[in-house]
Amino acid sequence: MNSMNATTTPFRPTTFCDCMLVSWMLCRCVLLPSACVVLALPAAHRTALGSDKAASEPTTPVFGIAERSGQPLLKADQPWESFFMGWVQVMRVDGKWRLWYLSATQTYKDDSDGYLCYAESDDGVTWVKPDLGLVVFDGSRKNNILLDSKDVGGVQGHMIVHDIDAPPAERYKLTIIKPSPNKEHFWIYAMVSADGLRFTAIPEPIFRFNSDTQNTLVREKDRWRMYVRMWDPHLWSGERVVGLTESKDFTNFPAPRIVLRRDASDPKELQFYNPALSKLNDRLWVMLPSAFMTQQNTVVPHLAWSRDGEHFTRVGSEPFLPLRAGAFDSQSIYVGPGAVPGPRPDTWWFYYTASVYGHDNPTKEKRSYQQAMGRFLLEVNVGEKGFTGDPSED
């Protein structure tokens, strides 16, 4: 364990993994047409955690990918998405699947540009981009745009929380990043909403430190936790790492501390790009940060887990959600924060955006990121007793 309390553990096959390997050998070519998912990935991606001693304990979680999209569930197909569609977040509220995502046009210049958009679904597979009539784009309100960065100063890095204990007008809390007054940092600002569509801004920033990625906001007992990007040791020239900051009043988050970074077993080019954290229940926090391989120009998620949301254990040193050659997720994958309870106990849906381009491809080559959204079903096995968390929907 390094000084930041993040450890890396080798892959160790288990009986659960061996069983799933048999399933994979039988089902590797099977597709579900209605959901476009691939069943039972190989055992190399079903990974045991902790030391050898910890791995033998019944409460040590074993993570597996039970299903994964074979085809995109959502594509960039609108004029306001002509350059970029990404940073998804999905939740299920009262039976409705709700999606917030970012988009940008060919006029995109930096992280202060873009649009916050919305889509919804009855099953989490087939998505509709409704005409909301909220924002004018190219002379028309016929679009699914919630916020235009030109109107609010920035919409990148969004994270939405459904806060059922808040007053009705503040049931949805949104965090976004905007340039600081001196344009040298990206500070975090907040907005509130009754319906998750029409937002009112909180004027002052809630985090006056740099975090230039999609952040994660979690309500934890009497406080708020926010997982952010840090640069260590120097802003813009150091290593990207994941930080944590906490606040009891939601309006003033102090300087963060590092909770996840590469370790000695990782190549020096690896940098953790985003937190992508989800609290699955009171006993399990999962982080799926994308490892930006700066020399290979790829972005691929790893997995780390925690019992308290502060001390994380890495799942081996290999990517957890691998890139797929020739597919829509061949070069870059970014998992969204938050997880939706799956069809069985101890399963959760995670959504991600992916691209056929790397992070640093020249803009003139990309022209369009050709990004699309997929999902996978995370399955957690902890022995005979399983988890006590209730995976029921909101």
Image: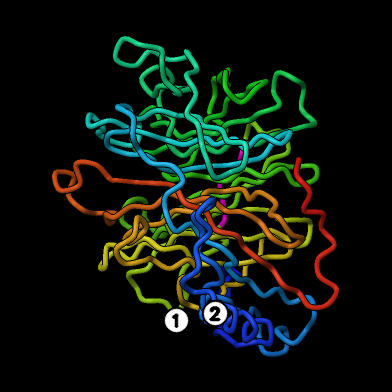
Q: Residues within 10 Å of mark 2 (few under 14, many from 20)?
A: few
Q: Is residue 85 left or right of residue 387?
A: left
Identify whether 161 is placed above or below 26. Answer: above
> Which residue was labeled with disc 1?
265
Position in image of residue 324 (x %, y %): 36, 66
Q: Quadrant of the C terminus?
A: top right
Q: Is residue 343 left or right of residue 301?
A: right
Residue 1 seen in this snapshot: no
Which residue is painted at 38% across and 41% down in the image? 75
CA gap, disc 1 to disc 2?
34 Å
Read off the magenta span.
Answer: 253-257
Q: Are marks 1 and 2 in contact (CB under 8 Å)?
A: no
Q: Is residue 372 left or right of residue 146?
A: left
Determine the main secondary structure of the stretch shown in magenta: loop
Amino acid type, residue under disc 1 in the picture = Ser
Amino acid type, residue under disc 2 in the picture = Leu
Q: Residue furthest left?
A: 364
Numbered tag placed on residue 26 in the rendering? 2
